[in-house]
Image: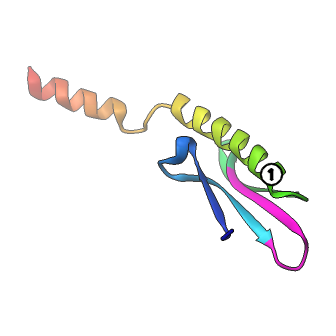
Amino acid sequence: MKFPKRLRHNGRGKVLATIYKRPEHPQYRLYWRARVDGKARSRMKDFAAYSEAKRAGDKVVADVAKKESATPARNATPGVYVFCRSFF
């Protein structure tokens, strides 16, 4: 198996988490970025088995994707405003 493994929501889109194999230890590290108090922060967690890391990674990816879909796009309102102004 080749590492790092990049995890995407539903197998497509941007990479939301990554699993690394630790060469000096028989461990796997799950890495992802999360927003804490409005700021992006790196998060890491170590696992003894790949299956544990994959299961936790899938859960993290689902949570991150759900939070990203809940936040509105920053440019949504101005684009609608410009469209309405040019339409009338």
Q: Nearer the viewer, residue 72 or 10?
A: 10
Q: Which residues are magenta?
A: 22-33
Q: Quadrant of the C terminus?
A: top left
Looking at the image, which residue sits at the far front?
Answer: 1
Looking at the image, which residue sits at the far top?
Answer: 88
> Can residue 41 be seen here?
no
Q: What residue is drawn where x is 53% and y is 47%?
A: 11
Q: Position of residue 69 (x, y in %)?
A: 52, 32
Q: Position of residue 3 (x, y in %)?
A: 68, 70
The amino acid type, in three-letter code, at marker 1 is Ser
Q: Position of residue 12 (x, y in %)?
A: 48, 48
Indicate the quadrant where residue 23 lies. Answer: bottom right
For residue 55: magenta?
A: no
- 14 over 63 or under it: above or below: below
Q: What residue is drawn where x is 91% and y is 74%?
A: 25
For residue 23: magenta?
A: yes
For mark 1, give the secondary structure.
helix
* Side of 83 where 10 appears, left or right: right
Q: Main secondary structure of the magenta part?
A: strand
What residue did someone put label 1 on?
Answer: 51
Q: Quadrant of the N terminus?
A: bottom right
Q: Position of residue 82 (x, y in %)?
A: 20, 32
* Side of 53 where 35 appears, left or right: left
- 80 over 29 or under it: above or below: above
